[in-house]
Each structure stands twice: as C-alpha cells, then as structure tokens.
Image (cartoon, rainbow, N blue to C red):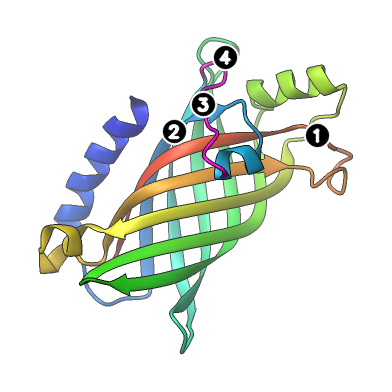
C-alpha cells in the first residue's frame, strides 16, 4: 500500500516536471520486505516478510555513457527511509551505485531492464537483517554491498503522451548483502525489498 501511495505522489511530481532530453534522472520508490532470497524473487517466488517492514526513498542519477547498442550507464545515489513497523525506530539509508539499462523498443513501446551494483550504508541494522542473522547465526553490518534489478516501461509511450515519454513506471528488487562473507564477514545476512517506482529524466 505504501508503495502505491508513493507511486501516485511520484506520478504527480514527474508530470509537473515534464520530460526532455537530458542527462539527469530522478526516481521515487517505495516497497516492502520479502522473506525470500534474491534468486527466488527473480524466479517470481515472492512474498511478504513476517516483520511487515517497508521503505520509501528517492534516487538521483547522471548519465555517464550512452552506448551504440541500446545500453545506458548511470551513476546514481539515493536516500531511503526504513519503516520498521514498531520493531525499532525508523532510520535512513544512503546508497551509491552504477546502473546499466538495456532499452528494448518494440510495437512503439519502450521496456527497460536495469542492473545496479554499489554500496549501501544504513544508519541502523534493518530488523529483517537482524532476524536473518539470528536464524543463520550470522553477523550484521551497517555497510553492505548493494544490488538492484529493475524493469519498467515508458508511461508516455503506453498512454501516447509525448511529454511523458521519458517517465518510467515499474518494479525494482532492492538487495543488501555481504557477498558470502566478503564484506564485514556477513555470509548469509541481508535483506530484499520489492519496490514500486516511477522515474523521470529531465
């Protein structure tokens, strides 16, 4: 529900901004924690975590390179607010990452698939990560590797509105982990969040 509310707010914001050819991007997103692991969610085996926690946030990006093939590379950073559902105080997280987009154009539509890699620093350990560490007798860390996968479509092309062709709506899988112990000895602990997002270029 929080994700849908955020998407509605983002829609109004992006519509006010308009869209034009530029190197900058702005994404608003919100979502919920998932108890499945990264691979399970990608295979469409997704669900809610019993802790019922959520998050909302904003990411900004700058286009580093547009390849001859339908790929674009962005440098991005974000700030998120973890909503811990009373388990502990809510807190912020910052992210910095590189993201590669593949643009698929067909039937006058555009579909983007994105893959990102970088770092995440949370100002507190998310409750779902604490529970994961307890279950697997693992460690926790405020700083972890950051990974995300996304898929979205052009709002303008779907609705045939030219001014919204550089505005995209879709889904993002947000992932924090220690890469099997490579970061701060976190082997199995981490978290996954399914997010609804809307992104515009201006």
The residue to which callout 3 is attached is 47
Q: Is residue 48 magenta?
A: yes
Up-down relation of residue 133 to residue 152 (above or below): above
Q: Of 144 and 158, which appears nearest the observer? A: 158
Considering every residue shown, the one lying at the far top of the view is: 86
Front of the two marks 2 and 3: 3
Residue shown at 26%/77% (left/top)? 21
Label 1 to label 4: alpha-carbon separation: 18 Å
The residue to which callout 2 is attached is 31
The residue to which callout 4 is attached is 50
Q: How crowded is mark 1: few (under 14 residues within 10 Å), some or many (20 or more)?
A: many
Q: Give the range drawn in magenta.
A: 43-52
Up-down relation of residue 93 to residue 23 (above or below): above
Label 1 to label 3: alpha-carbon separation: 19 Å
Magenta-drawn stretch, dominant element (helix, strand or loop): loop
Residue shown at 79%/47% (left/top)? 179
The residue to which callout 1 is attached is 188
Classify residue 110 as left or right of residue 114: left
Res 5 visible: yes
Q: Do the residues labelled 2 and 4 touch (CB within 8 Å)?
A: no
Q: Which of marks 1 and 3 is nearer the N terminus?
A: 3
Classify residue 35 as left or right of residue 165: right
């Amino acid at each position: 529900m929080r994700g849908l509310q955020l998407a509605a707010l983002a829609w109004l914001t992006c519509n006010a901004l308009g869209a034009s050819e530029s190197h900058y991007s702005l994404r608003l997103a919100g979502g919920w924690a998932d108890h499945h692991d990264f691979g399970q969610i990608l295979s469409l085996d997704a669900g809610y975590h019993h802790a019922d926690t959520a998050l909302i946030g904003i990411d900004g990006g700058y286009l580093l390179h547009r390849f001859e093939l339908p790929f674009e590379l962005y440098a991005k950073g974000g700030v998120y607010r973890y909503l811990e559902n009373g388990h502990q105080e809510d807190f912020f997280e910052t992210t910095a990452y590189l993201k590669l987009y593949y643009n698929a154009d067909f039937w006058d539509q555009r579909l983007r698939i994105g893959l990102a890699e970088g770092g995440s620093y949370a100002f507190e350990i998310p409750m779902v990560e604490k529970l994961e560490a307890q279950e697997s007798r693992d460690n926790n860390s405020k700083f972890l590797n950051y990974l995300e996968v996304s898929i979205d479509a052009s709002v303008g092309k779907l609705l045939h509105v030219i001014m919204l062709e550089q505005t995209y709506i879709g889904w993002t899988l947000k992932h924090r982990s220690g890469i099997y112990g490579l970061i701060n000895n976190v082997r199995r602990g981490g978290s996954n969040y399914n997010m609804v997002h809307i992104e515009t270029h201006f």
